[in-house]
């Protein structure tokens, strides 16, 4: 996969899956805009790593649930590189609680950061992608958006929403050479899942047919493929990367 001369934005790429995606796209030759919110030190380290790989990179702090921040993320990218070819909507949070105890704020915050951000960022880049008649949007959903999960009414709804949004974007812009696909990871070893109690992680691992948690790199490989020219005939799809856990038991 050759992404030379491509310009990519990866949201929430200071750590975890986003970081691995940013590095993988850079390995394939892309210049990568690293986005994060809060402490920018980890994002700065990702930029340094990308530069060591021989590609250009910069950090743009932005809360991707906020329209003004998203405008500044995309405008800064286009000012610096003249275009944006690849958008990876990766930023996401959890605020788990059983539905009976879930607050309005926990619902709204997760929907805003996980789903509204995908709408805002996609809308902002599409203008540029449509003009150049080439673009790739890859949205990070989750298997819980497909199968549900107790304690994650907000999160699973946001991730299911991403799938509907991805398919709609795919249909709206297919004629302009732009594809939109979603990836549904299972349990990936990142700070998000490291918050889970050790017994819960062990119990999950026992349910994974392949017998181990995925790594951020496992997800990043698929993103690099979907962002490439080789994936030009794939759009509106959901690729599950979960070691087989969503296959269920006999
Ligand atoms: P993570 O380690 O918690 O990293 C999430 C990143 O998103 C962090 O860098 C975070 O920044 C950033 N972020 C949060 N809110 C943001 C906002 N409003 N604007 C910009 N950036 C923001 O999570 P992860 O495990 O790598 O997950 C990445 C994506 O994969 C998420 O969408 C998640 O739902 C999805 N996913 C993960 C798994 C898994 O098992 N890990 C499974 C399925 C799907 P801060 O560091 O400043 O908080």
Image (spheres, helix red, strand yellow):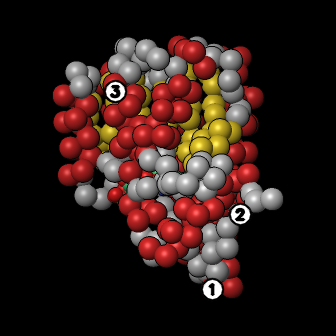
Please tell me the numbered disc located at residue 148: 2
Report helix, strand or loop for mark 3: helix
Q: Secondary structure at mark 2?
A: loop
Circle 3 Cα neighbour tier, 10 Å, few/some/many (<14 / 14–19 / ≥20)? many
Q: Is residue 126 left or right of residue 7?
A: right
Query: Residue under circle 3?
Result: 26
The answer to which quarter of the image holds residue 29 is: top left
Q: Is residue 226 visible?
A: yes
Closer-to-camera residue (191/44): 191
Which of pointers 1 and 3 lies earlier in the amino acid sequence? 3
Residue at image position (55%, 62%) is 205
- Residue 232, image x, y percentages: 63, 17
Q: Which residue is mark 1?
A: 101
Q: Residue at x 68, y 79 (%)?
A: 99
Image position, residue 240 (x, y; %): 64, 43
Compare marks 1 and 2 and give the one earlier in the sequence: 1
Q: Position of residue 71 (x, y in %)?
A: 43, 40
Residue 116 disc label: none
Ligand 1: quadrant of the figure = bottom left
Marks 3 and 2 close (CB-CB < 8 Å): no
Few, some or many residues within 10 Å of mark 1 (<14, 14–19, 20+):
few
- Label 3 vs label 2: CA separation? 34 Å
Q: For residue 180, what is the image quadrant?
A: top right
């Amino acid at each position: 996969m050759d992404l030379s001369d491509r310009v990519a934005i990866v949201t929430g790429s200071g750590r975890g899956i986003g970081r691995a995606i940013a590095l993988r796209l850079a390995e394939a030759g892309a210049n990568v805009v690293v986005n994060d919110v809060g402490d920018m030190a980890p994002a700065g380290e990702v930029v340094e790593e990308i530069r060591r790989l021989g590609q250009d990179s910069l950090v743009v702090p932005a809360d991707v649930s906020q329209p003004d921040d998203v405008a500044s993320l995309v405008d800064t990218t286009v000012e610096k590189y003249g275009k944006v070819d690849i958008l990876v909507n990766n930023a996401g949070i959890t605020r788990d609680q059983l539905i009976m105890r879930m607050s309005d704020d926990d619902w709204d915050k997760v929907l805003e950061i996980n789903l509204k951000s995908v709408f805002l960022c996609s809308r902002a880049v599409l203008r540029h992608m449509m003009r150049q008649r080439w673009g790739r949007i890859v949205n990070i959903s989750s298997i819980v958006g497909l199968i549900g999960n107790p304690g994650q009414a907000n999160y699973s709804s946001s991730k299911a929403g991403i799938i509907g949004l991805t398919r709609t974007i795919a249909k709206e812009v297919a004629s302009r050479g732009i594809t939109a696909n979603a990836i549904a990871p299972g349990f990936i070893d990142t700070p998000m899942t490291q918050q889970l109690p050790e017994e819960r992680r062990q119990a999950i691992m026992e349910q994974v047919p392949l017998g181990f948690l995925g790594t951020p790199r496992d997800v990043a490989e698929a993103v690099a493929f979907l962002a490439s020219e080789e994936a030009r005939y794939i759009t509106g799809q959901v690729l599950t990367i979960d070691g087989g856990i969503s296959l269920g038991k006999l």
